[in-house]
Image (spheres, grey):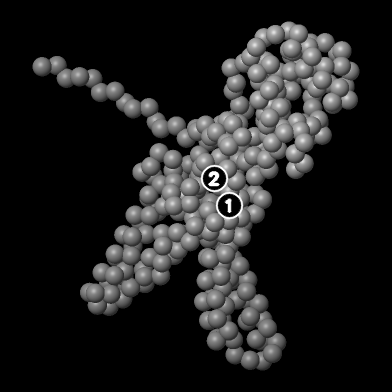
Amino acid sequence: MARRPRTSRPPLSLDRALVTPEGVTLNLRLGSAGARAGALVLDLLIMLAILVGFTLLVVLLGQVAGTTTRPLLLVVWLLGFFLLRNFYFVAFEAGGRAATPGKRLQKLRVIARDGGRLTPAAVLARNLMREVELFLPISFLPFAFAEGTIDGWVGFLALGWACLFLFFLLFNRDRMRAGDLVAGTWVVENERKQIGVELLDPTALEGDRHRFTPEELAAYGTFELHKLEEVLRREDRHDQFMVARTIRTKLGRDPDAGHDREFLEAYYAALRLELERKLLFGTRKKDKHDRV
């Protein structure tokens, strides 16, 4: 009996389409396991550098004052490590960039998996889980080198616990650690590919004929974007002429400049990209009356 030829499975894609509550589709790429591991290592090195800096400062102040610094050094390391591991990640990810310095260097950020705004509760939940995933088992690792069978087994059990959570993101298609699963978050790349919409001319954003300033793109919001998409899909030249004339007047341009379809495609593509960019940073402009 002839054997069936083996077929290799295609690699799992990290590209995702996320539909926001406003109905805008964001084309995203999830952060790879390597990029996320690199970001964590960078953040841990930054935390270590902060602790070393405070240690040197305490030693210097102790020498100036002529006092012993050993008790103060113990306080710096115990209290400093506690504060850093509990507030470093939360403080940076709750900010406007939704990323720690390590994530920013790796071009990553945290977003809500439902397309909504990243809430402080979600940031807190995903980072409190890091205590269970990483820092708690690490605190038991010294027992692996202690004398005595029981203490040693506790340490090795803690090592297995840490490895289980560290490699968790390799075994799910969305590259989520346990904290992401609990908080409903994704870690995505900041650099995203341009949107691909079937109704747009691929050259809509090329050339210098149609360039829009940030002020011109701020004139409209998500509601108008959907209406413009409807106009483009209907292929009604009269409607396109009237809408192009209205938009040009709103932007302070010549209302009778011509090339209406081309102009509307270019403005639609530019407005959509601008709204996507703002949505990822938590800014949501519902319509032209919304001031953000």
Tag 1–tag 2 contact (CB < 8 Å): yes
Looking at marks 1 and 2 on the same chain, the residue that comes earlier in the sequence is marked by 2
Left or right: where 276 falls relative to 168: right
Q: Which residue is mark 1?
A: 119
| In the rendered image, the vertical position of residue 146 relative to residue 41, given as above or below | below
Q: Which residue is mark 2?
A: 112
User: Quick one: which residue is furthest to the top in this view?
Assistant: 237
Q: What is the spatial separation of the Cα atoms under label 1 and label 2, in whole angstroms? A: 8 Å
Q: Is residue 238 in view from this perspective?
A: yes
Left or right: where 48 falls relative to 233: left
Name the residue at 58% across, 43% down: 116
Question: In the rendered structure, which amino acid carries the disc numbered 2?
Answer: Ala
Q: Quadrant of residue 42?
A: bottom right
| In the rendered image, the vertical position of residue 236 relative to residue 159, given as above or below | above
Name the residue at 53% across, 59% down: 124
User: Quick one: which residue is furthest to the front in this view?
Assistant: 289
Q: Residues within 10 Å of mark 1 (few under 14, many from 20)?
A: some
Left or right: where 244 falls relative to 113: right
Q: Secondary structure at mark 1?
A: loop
Name the residue at 60% across, 31% down: 24
Q: Quadrant of residue 233?
A: top right
Q: Nearer the viewer, residue 211 or 244?
A: 244
Q: Secondary structure at mark 2?
A: strand
Q: Position of residue 211 (x, y in %)?
A: 79, 24
- The label shown at residue 222 is none
Q: Quadrant of residue 47?
A: bottom right
**Total of numbered circles in the picture?**
2
Question: In the rendered structure, which amino acid carries the disc numbered 1?
Answer: Thr
Left or right: where 289 falls relative to 158: right
User: Quick one: which residue is furthest to the left in this view?
Assistant: 1
